[in-house]
Amino acid sequence: AAKGGGRGQYRFYHMDFTDGAKHRRQIEEDLRDAMEADTLEMYYQPIVESKTNKLKCLEALMRWEHEERGFISPGIFIPVAEDIGLIKDLGEWALRRACFQAKEWQLDLRVAVNVSAIQFARDDFPDLVKSILIESTLEPHRLELEITESVFVGDAERTQEKFEELKRLGVRLALDDFGTGYSSLSYLQHAPFDKIKIDQSFVRGATEKGNNNPAIMSAIVNLAESLKMETVAEGVETKDELTLVTERGASHVQGFIFSQAISQEELLERLERKDVFFEPRGPEKYRAE
Ligand code: C2E
Ligand code: MG
Ligand code: MG
Ligand code: MG
């Protein structure tokens, strides 16, 4: 164990400097190769409006199918890309790809793109968004940027300026994974968010008796409503969860109950059939329009 280290430190030592390090170096190398070979893909997961059951938005989620290891979660490789300085290129690629593909959807659907705090910290981030909008000719109101509370660690004034620049471009801003950070409420004082995404940890277990999550969800929804922000309940998997989050007032729902993230090809097919996301556990079909 690391000298003088407590339990946490031992674990750190063990994971990062022995097997973990090797594994990680391999991921780093393979990720560089994957980017070079252009084998990463964007998949899209529907976000549905609760009141109307209409598809309103698709969240762009990165997918990497590794030759030997199979599918690797962005939850694993995005932090690696951040650490080794690849996120700048990777994030730019993702944003460009999502904007160009959304332009192919024909319908007035929005695309939500995740933005890493490191990517957001670039001084030229609003300019980058602007030029990608111009290149792709995507209407700005169709682009939503999902950011997490971690963007607030930097220069607060500059962060605020960037929000304003982005709003001036006409894009929408969503606060992702809400409720998982340290001091969520202060971020809402000035930031011009259009949407709050309630983290899926508040949905898990929410249907069990005596669980606190429904009360927390109601509080977040009330807060968002008074700030004129939309809400998305993330990670809704079952009919009971869908009923619960709708009762609690979430204006939008996202989760496996509708669909996992699907490829652009599959999305275009479903849009063509006007049969976008059938909901197998209930009587209703979820339509694009
Ligand atoms: P996120 O932005 O909070 O995305 C939602 C995650 O929840 C996705 O995982 C999605 O597949 C998953 N999910 C959606 N519905 C359900 C459900 O009903 N049940 C369960 N168990 N999970 C559900 P994914 O695709 O593995 O992405 C993980 C994280 O990786 C994302 O969390 C986001 O932080 C990051 N990420 C993904 N793509 C990108 C990207 O292009 N750029 C950046 N910077 N980050 C990305
Ligand atoms: Mg997200
Ligand atoms: Mg999220
Ligand atoms: Mg997340």
Image (spheres, helix red, strand yellow):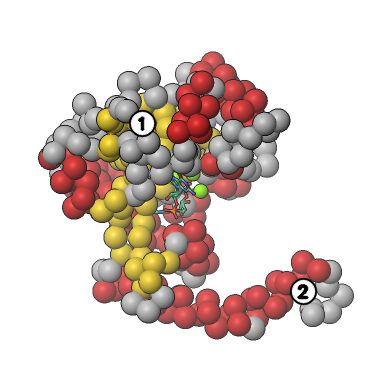
**Which quadrant would residue 230 be assigned to in this image?**
top left
Q: Is residue 230 above or below residue 163?
A: above
Above or below residue 5? Residue 248 is above
* Residue 265 percent location from the top left of the image: 18, 52
The residue pinned by badge 2 equals 10
Position of residue 13 in the picture relative to residue 189 (left or right): right
Question: In front here: 84 or 216?
Answer: 216
Q: Which residue is drawn at 71% across and 76% down?
A: 13
Query: Within 10 Å of the Cα at label 1, are there few (<14), some (14-19), or many (20+) other Cα atoms?
Result: few
Q: Which quadrant of the view contains residue 129?
A: top left
- Compute the Cα span from label 2 to label 1: 49 Å
Percent coordinates x, y for residue 213 in the rendering: 64, 32
258 left or right of 8 in image: left
Label 1 sits on a secondary structure element that is: loop
Above/below status of 164 relative to 36: above
Q: Which residue lies furthest to the right in this view?
A: 4
